[in-house]
Image (tube, grey):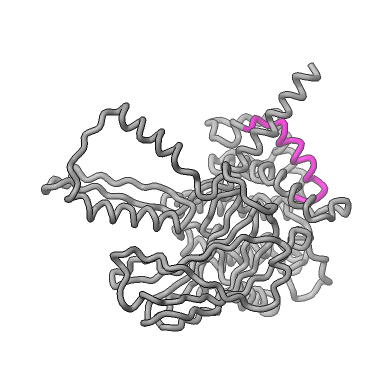
Amino acid sequence: MERSSASSEKQRKKLATIEAKLLLDSPNLPLKFVYKPKGNNSKATQAYTFLLSSEFERTLWVEAVETLKRNIGQRVPVHLQSDEVENHVKACRTAIEPPNGFSKAVSGPAMGGELQVIIHSLKGLHKPADSYVVIELDSYGHYFHKVRTKMVVKSTEPHWEEDFSVELEGTRGLRILLYEEDCMQTAVLRGKAEIELTEQWLKSLKAPQYIKLTHQLSKACLTRNTVGEELTLCLTLRYLSNDLTLRRPPQRLAGSSIFNVPIEETCQREKRQIPYIISCCVREIDRRGLEELGIYRVSGLTTDINKLRKAFDTRGSESDSLLKDVDINSVSGLLKSYLRQLPEALFTDRLYPRFLQAFSTLDVSASLHGVEDIEVEGGARTLTQLFSSLPQVNQKVIGYLLEHLVRVNSKEIQNKMSLHNLATVFGPTLLRPAPSSSASDSADLLSMSTMDVMAQAGILHFFLLRSSRRLPIQLS
């Protein structure tokens, strides 16, 4: 019996690790193909949508399709049997190694923590171009779109001066992409750079970095105005390790500020059941962010978030109007920042181990993959009982946030935010406790956070799924 129990626990941990990778790798960048046969038969038109995680990979797909379209008239039609197609696919899988997948060993340890990026300017363009910058970071071997400059600047030396904060999760590399919008507002990749990230290198940086970008234009797009260009992007990188980002801030003395203040104190001072900053952000996102692609996953501007934070800390109810003037991703970033900087997570440090224990006895396949009826028994019953044990303020705030996230999920076709994606984003924010003093080593902290990310996302997904089906999340 002991061997069977140990084997079962080992398989459970292995399954949790695989599911954590799947959650982290959820793609959200759409690539649409429309097939229009010759003639005027509009009913025969077929549309297909693929979801990708990397802007660069999407660009490669578009360029490959455009090349095929240009050459299609020059090729002799080839009719293949199904077994021939299958053999071709197998041959391609054998010949092509994933560019940065799980099967490829990448040097250096995976990093956790936070990376602050300031995109300054670009030099080297021979003629004015509508330019913007995209930054992608890899997570456990796969690249994901993380940052895009808000402004599209037309100049030979564009200046953005935009800053972003991005969470690192199993990260080893950074990819910089420079895009130009042509007259048809189609994005054309102009330059690219890839940087291998190490903690030692990032901590040694004291000044802005000048990164040379390699040309990515196809031969059909190269002109005499682009040949010979040496593109250099200026940006600043600042790294905060896990032992800093996971450490919850010390409690402030009661006053006018709301950040780093226990949520019950804020509600008591404001005489509200939900803190004003939470209701303002939720209301604004409900108004104009429900259909925003990747809402809560795309980073907002750090300057906007800091400006809003200062306004709510000093001006209180007068700062609501400022939310209407900033990018919606900055509003979502402000909400996440406020929740992340609470002295104690909403699910509380005291009950966190019990939530983990209850989740370990839950039917993971039923709770995560959409069984039609989740009975409140066993681990599920314990989770709802524990939720009922939370302070009343915490229960109301969590319930309010769950209802909002369910509304976000109702527009999944537009925003690509499934319940799994939302649980992955908010799970660590709402559940992660302050690290114990015995786990002060940054490597231990990264290992601990990686092991818990699946459980944190899974617990929140359990409550999100029940909320979406109008099932009670607490025992009466």
Q: Is residue 419 magenta?
A: no
Instruction: Classify residue 419 as left or right of residue 229.
Output: right
Instruction: Classify residue 218 as left or right of residue 367.
Output: left
Foreground: 341 or 31? 31
Instruction: Classify residue 43 as left or right of residue 305.
Output: left
Q: Which residues are magenta?
A: 347-364
Q: Quadrant of residue 185?
A: bottom left
Residue extending farthest to the left is: 39
Quadrant where the image shows the C terminus:
top right
Residue 15: % across, % down: 64, 33
Residue 132: % across, % down: 45, 72
Residue extending farthest to the top is: 1
Q: Is residue 356 magenta?
A: yes
Foreground: 213 or 396? 213
Instruction: Classify residue 467 as left or right of residue 81.
Output: right
Foreground: 432 or 145? 145
Residue 469: % across, % down: 54, 39
Residue 115, above or below 358: below
User: Residue drawn 47% across and 49% down?
Assistant: 410
Residue 151, above or below 371: below
Quadrant where the image shows the N terminus:
top right
User: Residue drawn 64% across and 71% down?
Assistant: 237
Work out whether residue 322 can be spotted.
no
Work out whether residue 447 can be spotted.
yes
User: Residue drawn 32% across and 26% down?
Assistant: 83
User: Residue drawn 31% across and 67% down?
Assistant: 221
Number of marks drawn: 0
